[in-house]
Amino acid sequence: MSEFAGKHGLIVGVANKRSIAWAIARAVAAKGARLAVTYQGERLEDSVRELSADLADPLVLPLDVTSDEQIAEVAARCDQTFGGLDFVVHGAAFAPREELARPFLETSRDGFRVALDISAYSLVALARATAPLMEKNGGGSLLTLTYLGSERVFPNYNVMGVAKAALESSVRYLAAELGPRAIRVNAISAGPIKTLAASGISGFSSILQVYRDKAPLRRNTETGEVADAAAFLLGPAGRGVTGEILIVDGGYSIVGL
Ligand SMILES: NC(=O)c1ccc[n+]([C@@H]2O[C@H](COP(=O)([O-])OP(=O)(O)OC[C@H]3O[C@@H](n4cnc5c(N)ncnc54)[C@H](O)[C@@H]3O)[C@@H](O)[C@H]2O)c1
């Protein structure tokens, strides 16, 4: 199980041990990858450093994706330390809490801007900064995380659904442009999982229950399942796949009623 031996990856979006990005980091590290892991601000530094201590010789760096300077710094550090990148995981998303509690019609201009900037534009900025590093390694794979709220209406998901629609469209535009440089761009659309980000969505527990009741697999999605699908898309087994939104949700999305 060493399909990532000698490979270098950048993981953005780890907050704590429940983070989907952390499950992905563990899965690819177990298959031999060496990783750079970022944390958003000092508040999360200790938690991310503590988790990363389990990884082999990790690079742990600060990154707020709203800052082009910090994105450039992370790319430069990966370049200096690893000499290039083979894959990048983008697991950052945010919308102001009040936008996920009041009616979508009341979405503020600023809340809309912040949600789209952090949750969608950041993929474009990260792709631009890291594409040259992946090109150096002969190509690479960029992966982001999305949710079915991009195309269907879920209670209180609101502006985050709009941001995920922009994110998924960005995956396709980036895949088209970066394909000739042997860089693949994909997303995993995960079923709901209790994480820090999910705790901002009012009524999240009842959404989990609906999935348990209705999904063909009759259970909730686990981070490990998303991580295994991520390893497929990031590694050699996924070499023919780009511009894809792979749904990992126990089958919920196929059910009509
Ligand atoms: N949990 C779910 O139910 C679920 C389902 C489908 C998709 N997703 C997506 O998975 C991804 C990871 O979320 P998660 O559920 O693991 O929660 P999480 O809270 O563990 O991860 C979200 C991450 O985004 C980071 N982030 C927010 N603002 C940032 C900024 N300005 N700069 C840098 N990082 C920033 C946070 O630090 C955190 O690490 C998100 O894109 C989320 O929308 C989650």
Image: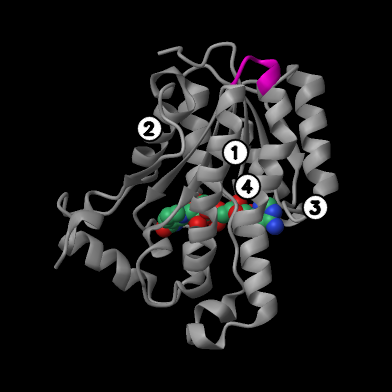
Residue 156 drawn at (x, y percent): 43, 77
| Three-letter residue code for mark 3 | Ser
Numbered label attached to residue 51: 1
Q: Give neighbour class at mark 2: few <14, some 14-19, many 20+ (Cα, 10 Å).
A: some
Q: Quadrant of residue 151?
A: bottom left
Q: Quadrant of ligand 1?
A: bottom right
Q: Earlier in the sequence, mark 4 or mark 2?
A: 4
Q: Nearer the viewer, mark 4 or mark 2?
A: 4
Q: Which mark is residue 123?
A: 4
Give the image location of residue 170, x and y in percent.
56, 49
Secondary structure under the numbered disc 1 in the rendered image: helix
Amino acid residing under circle 1: Leu
* Mark 3 or mark 2: whose residue is earlier in sequence: 3
Please state, as top left, top right, bottom left or bottom right, where the C terminus lies in the image. Answer: bottom left
Q: Which mark is residue 67?
A: 3
The earlier-in-sequence mark between 3 and 4 is 3
Q: CA distance from mark 3 to mark 4?
A: 12 Å
Q: Earlier in the sequence, mark 4 or mark 1?
A: 1
Q: Nearer the viewer, residue 205 or 239?
A: 239
Residue 112 in the magenta stretch? The answer is no
Q: Measuring 52% from the left and 16% from the top, which residue is drawn there?
A: 32
Picture residue at 52% right of the left edge, 45% below the top? 171
* Residue ID for mark 2: 228
Disc 3 secondary structure class: loop
Quarter of the figure with residue 218: bottom left
Q: Residue at x 73, y 26 (%)?
A: 132
Mark 4: amino acid: Leu
Magenta range: 135-139
Assign the magenta stretch its main secondary structure: loop
